[in-house]
C-alpha cells in the first residue's frame, strides 16, 4: 500500500474555488483503479493550506492516475490557485495505525 500526501498552499481568496474542485473530483479519483482512499486535510493554523491524503495499491496505480488526462485537467485548474509550489511525498506503511495493531497495546488491561 502506498500513501501519498500532497501539501498545497492556496491564495486565500481562492480556497473556496479549490474546495469546489475537490468536491467535484473526489469520486472520480476514488474510481481510478488502485485508489483505496482520498481525504482532504486543512492545516490547523494556516487555513489556506490543505493536504490530500490518499492510499494506492501501488506506485504504478498512482502513476497511471497522475498520467491520465483527467489528472492533467484537474491539476492545471488546481495549480492556477496556488500561492506556493505544492509539495508531495510518497510513503509505505511500516507499522499499524490502530492500537489493536500495536504489540504494546495487545496485552494492555481494558
Image (tube, rainbow, N blue to C red):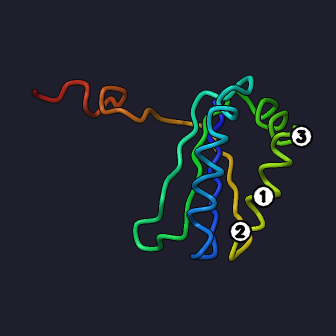
- 3D distance between C-alphas at marks 1 and 2: 7 Å
Residue sitting nearer the eye, 82 or 89: 82
Task: Give the residue at mark 1.
Answer: 77
Task: Give the residue at mark 3.
Answer: 69
- 3D distance between C-alphas at marks 3 and 2: 19 Å
Residue sitting nearer the eye, 109 or 73: 73
Q: Residues within 10 Å of mark 3 (few under 14, many from 20)?
A: few
Q: Are marks 3 and 2 in contact (CB under 8 Å)?
A: no
Mark 3 or mark 2, earlier in chain = 3
How many marks the image carries: the answer is 3
SS under mark 3: helix
SS under mark 2: loop
x, y (%) of residue 3? 62, 40
x, y (%) of residue 39? 53, 43
Q: Residues within 10 Å of mark 2 (few under 14, many from 20)?
A: some
x, y (%) of residue 107? 20, 24
- At horizontal 62% and vertical 70% (from top left) the residue drawn is 14
Q: Are marks 1 and 2 in contact (CB under 8 Å)?
A: yes
Task: Give the residue at mark 2.
Answer: 81
Q: Are marks 3 and 1 in contact (CB under 8 Å)?
A: no
Where 79 falls versus 98 (above or below)?
Answer: below
Q: Could you tell me which quadrant the N terminus lies in? A: top right
- 3D distance between C-alphas at marks 3 and 1: 13 Å
Q: Could you tell me which quadrant the C terminus lies in? A: top left
x, y (%) of residue 9? 62, 70
**Quarter where residue 4 is shown:** top right
SS under mark 1: helix
- At horizontal 48% and vertical 60% (from top left) the residue drawn is 42
Where 96 falls versus 84 (above or below)?
Answer: above
- At horizontal 53% and vertical 49% (from top left) the residue drawn is 40
Amino acid at each position: 500500500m502506498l500513501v501519498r500526501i500532497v501539501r498545497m498552499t492556496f491564495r486565500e481568496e481562492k480556497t473556496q474555488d479549490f474546495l469546489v474542485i475537490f468536491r467535484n473530483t473526489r469520486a472520480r479519483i476514488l474510481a481510478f483503479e488502485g485508489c483505496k482512499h482520498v481525504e482532504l486535510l486543512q492545516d490547523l493554523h494556516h487555513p489556506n493550506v490543505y493536504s490530500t491524503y490518499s492510499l494506492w495499491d501501488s506506485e504504478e496505480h498512482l502513476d497511471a492516475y497522475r498520467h491520465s488526462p483527467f489528472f492533467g485537467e484537474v491539476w492545471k485548474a488546481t495549480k492556477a490557485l496556488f500561492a506556493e509550489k505544492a509539495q508531495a511525498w510518497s510513503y509505505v506503511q511500516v507499522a499499524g495505525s490502530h492500537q489493536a495493531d500495536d504489540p504494546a497495546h495487545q496485552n494492555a488491561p481494558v
